[in-house]
């Protein structure tokens, strides 16, 4: 047995001093008073005085690049980075090569993860204009959801056939997750700035090309479809103040339409393009201070339900160029929890809200079975954070296969000191210390 003793347990809206006993894969007992002597004597002790103990983070949107794009990252490398950041479970996107748009491709990804993943895993099935029959065959027990790109994507994954979109929302009985940017608006904006700059449009125009209006109109369309057909909709990586008008401030349990915000949209603004250039080029784009402030506020107002990363590693060579040519996306999963704890240390959030939006809410929203909380009988997916141990992001401690981070040189106020996955210590004192042991997530809906 493993006993985490005298931690500050942050869980279900409260922070209390306590201890957690782990037996095999699961939480055996939670103590908020004295731990019996015979339990102490029979256990391997982890002394955690002054440390925060939280459920492991569940990241509902990552791109781990396998199969087919493994020069950028792969399941092993990026899941190692995940557990180093306290992320014990991830939901991975379908725009790999080949794309995950058939049940067979989805099964092959699960087979890869079974062999290689250092964190627990699940995979989305991607929608196209011509795979509706495949989507309807999906079994929801181990499939986290259906992903629809309602903005430009790789290959044929842009679903722009309105009749097909309507049928997916009407006929697929599963959570639908959307990337919302209106392609016609983006193309019009590209044409506008090409007339001024030619093909080499500076990166600072990226948020004007992939504009607030492009995001708003596409999100409004998705929400309109969900309302019309009664679909379960989750809108990913919301990035604008304007979109916040579309979402309700009410408890997650009462919602059929939910929203996600990513850490980079809570952290950076368009002023950072001068300093970081294409390293902070994402789709949807980093936008203004006002947008960032509106997103930060919407999280506390429960308009936004989940914080994730959209972790999307590219090589630095891929990131070269301007607004049209540099790859969109960046690596963040190793540092997302520390970023949110930094915002909490600055008084923008409280620790309890960080845990709610990164751990509890993803578990509730997707129906992840027996994870996301510190509860008796739940899987022991846990993270210990030292709030008084600063951490500087550098090339020496980055575990991403691409080898860089937009945070390089920044010092964060806390450190992840230990991650426990399925009852076993898998990360401690800066090192991954176990073989791949991630398990396929199970969903109850």
Image (cartoon, rainbow, N blue to C red):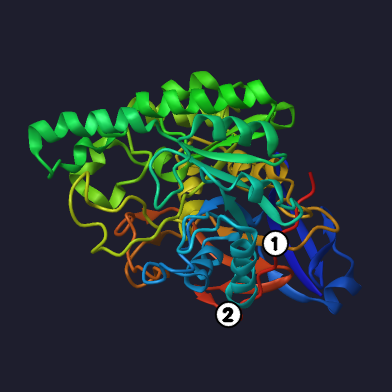
> Which residue corresponds to the image point at 62% horizontal and 33% vertical from the top-left?
167
| Residue found 46% across the figure and 24% down from its top | 243
Place of residue 186 in the rendered image (x, y in percent of width and height, measured from the top left): 30, 32
Q: Quadrant of residue 15?
A: top right
Percent coordinates x, y for residue 106 in the rendering? 61, 61
**Residue drawn 67% across and 61% down?**
382
User: Could you tell me which secondary element the residue under label 1 belongs to?
Assistant: loop
Q: Would residue 250 be visible to someone looking at this image? A: no
Q: Badge 2 is on which residue?
A: 433
Q: Quick one: label 2, few (<14), some, or many (20+) residues within 10 Å?
A: few
**Does 146 sit above or below residue 113?**
above
Give the answer, above or below, for where 199 lies relative to 254: below
* Image quarter hosting the C terminus: top right
| Residue 218 as seen in the image, left or right of residue 303 | left
Where on the picture, by quarter, is residue 260? top right
Give the side of residue 265 with respect to residue 88, left or right: left
Residue 60 % position (x, y): 58, 49
Query: Across the whole image, how many numbered discs are drawn on residues?
Result: 2
- Structural distance between the alpha carbons of marks 2 and 1: 15 Å
Q: Secondary structure at mark 2?
A: loop
Of residues 247 and 232, the one drawn nearer to the viewer in this rendering? 232
Left or right: residue 75 compared with residue 30: left
Q: Quadrant of residue 26?
A: bottom right
The numbered mark, 2 or 1, whose residue comes first in the sequence reads 1
Nearer the observer, 374 or 262: 262
**Residue on which the image places disc 1:** 381
Assess whether mark 1 and mark 2 are in contact (beta carbons under 8 angstroms).
no
Horizontally, residue 196 falls left or right of residue 424, namely left
Residue toward you, 172 or 51:
172
């Amino acid at each position: 047995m493993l006993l985490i003793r005298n931690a500050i347990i942050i869980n279900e809206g409260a922070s209390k001093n306590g201890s957690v006993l782990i037996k095999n894969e699961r939480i055996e007992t939670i103590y908020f008073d004295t731990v019996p002597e015979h339990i102490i004597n029979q256990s391997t002790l982890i002394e955690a005085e002054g440390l925060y103990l939280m459920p492991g983070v569940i990241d509902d949107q990552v791109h781990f690049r396998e199969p087919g794009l493994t020069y950028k990252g792969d399941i092993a490398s990026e899941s190692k980075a995940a557990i180093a950041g306290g992320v014990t479970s991830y939901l991975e996107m379908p725009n790999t090569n080949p794309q995950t748009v058939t049940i067979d491709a989805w099964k092959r990804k699960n087979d890869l993860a079974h062999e290689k993943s250092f964190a627990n895993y699940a995979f989305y099935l991607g929608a196209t204009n011509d795979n509706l029959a495949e989507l309807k065959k999906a079994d929801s027990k181990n499939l986290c959801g259906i992903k629809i790109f309602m903005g430009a994507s790789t290959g044929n994954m842009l679903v722009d056939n309105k009749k097909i979109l309507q049928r997916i929302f009407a006929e697929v009985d599963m959570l639908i997750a959307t990337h919302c940017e209106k392609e016609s608006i983006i193309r019009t904006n590209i044409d506008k700035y090409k007339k001024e700059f030619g093909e080499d449009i500076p990166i600072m125009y990226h948020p004007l090309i992939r504009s607030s209006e492009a995001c708003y109109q596409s999100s409004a369309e998705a929400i309109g479809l969900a309302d019309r057909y009664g679909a379960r909709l989750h809108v990913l990586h919301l990035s604008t103040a304007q979109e916040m008008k579309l979402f309700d401030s009410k408890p997650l349990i009462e919602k059929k339409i939910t929203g996600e915000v990513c850490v980079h949209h809570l952290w950076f603004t368009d002023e950072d393009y001068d300093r970081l250039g294409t390293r902070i080029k994402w789709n949807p784009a980093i936008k203004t201070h006002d947008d960032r402030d509106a997103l930060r506020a919407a999280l506390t107002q429960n308009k936004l339900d989940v914080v994730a990363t959209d972790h999307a590693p590219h090589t630095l060579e891929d990131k070269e160029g301007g607004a049209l040519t540099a790859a969109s996306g960046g690596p963040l999963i190793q540092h997302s929890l520390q970023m949110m704890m930094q915002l909490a240390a600055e008084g923008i959030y409280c620790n309890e809200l960080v845990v709610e939006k990164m751990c509890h809410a993803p578990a509730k929203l997707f129906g992840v079975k027996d994870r996301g909380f510190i509860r008796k009988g739940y899987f022991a997916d846990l993270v210990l954070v030292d709030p008084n141990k600063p951490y500087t992001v550098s090339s020496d401690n980055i575990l991403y296969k691409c080898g860089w981070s937009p945070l390089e040189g920044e010092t964060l106020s806390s450190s992840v000191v230990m991650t426990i996955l399925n009852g076993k210590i898998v990360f401690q004192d800066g090192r991954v210390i176990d073989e791949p042991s991630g398990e396929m997530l199970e969903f109850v809906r």
